[in-house]
Image (cartoon, rainbow, N blue to C red):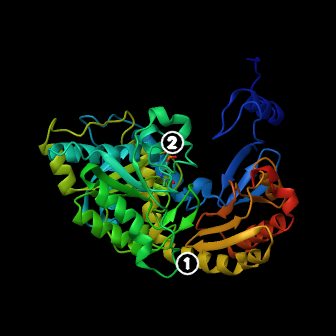
Amino acid sequence: MASTTLPLSTEALLAFDREHLWHPYSSTLNPPQVFAVASASGTRLKLEDGRELIDGMASWWSVIHGYSHPELNSALHRQIDKMSHVMFGGLTHRPAVELSARLLEITPSTLTRVFFSDSGSVAVEVAIKLAIQYWAARQQPRKHRLLTVRGGYHGDTFGAMAVCDPVTGMHSLFSHALTQHIFADRPDIAFDGTWHEDAFSNVEQSMRQHHMEIAAVIVEPIVQGAGGMWFYHREYLRKLRALCDELDTLLIFDEIATGFGRTGKLFACEHAGVNPDIMCLGKALTGGYMSLAATLTTADVAATISGGEPGVFMHGPTFMANPLACAVSLASIDLLHETHWSTKVLNIEAKLRTLLEPCRSLSAVSDVRILGAIGVVELHQAVDMYRIPQLFIERGVWLRPFGRLVYLMPPYIISDAELATIADAIYAVLSDPPLVMRIEEA
Ligand SMILES: *Cc1c(COP(=O)(O)O)cnc(C)c1O
């Protein structure tokens, strides 16, 4: 490793990054271009070279109130002066208890028990372990598999990866090491489509065939995120709940991307009016300030596990219920209510419907869909991940498309003018398909 004199120049910083760091899903031989952010506030990312970008990504769903929010900053300052961290084994603290109380107030009333962890993937691991321990405690160890639908994304750790879409989740690479679960077809009727019963027959058939081995069904309610940005019909969730009840199977909702207002409801399951037995939260939980996740469950699941062998739930991360993360999360939830999140999200939805509509007529575009504060422009072919962010940056916008999807999920504080700038940039960039398409991926 080259010796380094600090502070680095921007060029040296980027060169070191290229030589020595990994970025998400990246190659070290052909590293993606990355941009150095010096600071961020509100909806703006400020790059080291002085350029300022409007953020269309909310840092992967999480920064719902914008960057460097004064109230969230001060919640963290107050907490750091008391304590940054303390172990959760044998100890408890006000931030954890107050945050759980708030979470139980705003989530479905059937959920009464909270397990904190440090990332979304781990919250999913915890949910899977809860489901397996539940059936072990009920003397039905055969019920240890999961059923899920294609097109899902639940995280990158092994347990979570095993319920991600088998193709986009690249299962074949890890097939010898992954638990084999049961996959049903993607829920294929769109959120605003017309429901017909055939749309449920594939999953129903799998459930009836395998329920003796199924511990739980896990899905992202209403919105499948990283697995394809797909919005599906609420009736699917209602039928799924009824079938899980009939066949005695737990239902897990992964609300890590959808939680905290993103889809126009505080939690996406409210669109269908159905409650899960286990719910995973993460991403926007702390307003995007820190890594924190939570797995919530019912009194029945908690009591059954605790009444079985070995009488305890077998999980306990080092940084469980970190006080800083809990404090900023509590402040973020309060801020959601104080700032009338619902009006904001519904306004973004209405604006995106108008602003993204022109994209529909572009030859590169196959679909435009909007739900809450999520806008998706789907293309016929995959974009060139190496070139397209640069084209948006030239227009003052931060977007990070993947595959055939150009999408935005901005901070809720975004202005109408900023939304228009992002929409114009999308239209302009996609108007020139040869510039953005990697033809060999078609
Ligand atoms: C992002 C995401 C996860 C994984 O969360 P991490 O914090 O990245 O581990 C799990 N499920 C869904 C639906 C997600 O969007």
Instruction: Residue under label 2, please give it.
Output: 156
Secondary structure beneath dot 1 equals helix
Q: Amino acid at mark 1?
A: Leu
Observer-nearest of 27 and 299: 27
Residue 372: percent from the left, percent from the top?
55, 73
Q: Earlier in the sequence, mark 2 or mark 1?
A: 2
Residue 368 drawn above or below residue 120: below
Residue at 70% from the left image edge and 54% from the top image edge: 400
Instruction: Say if residue 271 shows up in the picture.
Output: no
**Residue 306 in the figure: left or right of residue 103:** left
Residue 85 drawn above or below residue 369: above
Residue at 23% from the left image edge and 61% from the top image edge: 247
Secondary structure beneath dot 2 equals loop
Q: Are marks 2 and 1 in contact (CB under 8 Å)?
A: no
Q: Looking at this rendering, what residue extends furthest in the left direction?
A: 307
Instruction: Residue under label 1, please give it.
Output: 346
Observer-nearest of 144 and 88: 144
Residue 331: percent from the left, percent from the top?
44, 58
Q: Quadrant of residue 381?
A: bottom right
Q: Is the CB–ligand 1 distance for label 2 below 8 Å?
A: yes
Q: Amino acid at mark 2?
A: Asp
Which label sits on residue 251?
none
Alpha carbon of mark 2 to alpha carbon of mark 1: how far? 31 Å
Residue 407: percent from the left, percent from the top?
66, 63
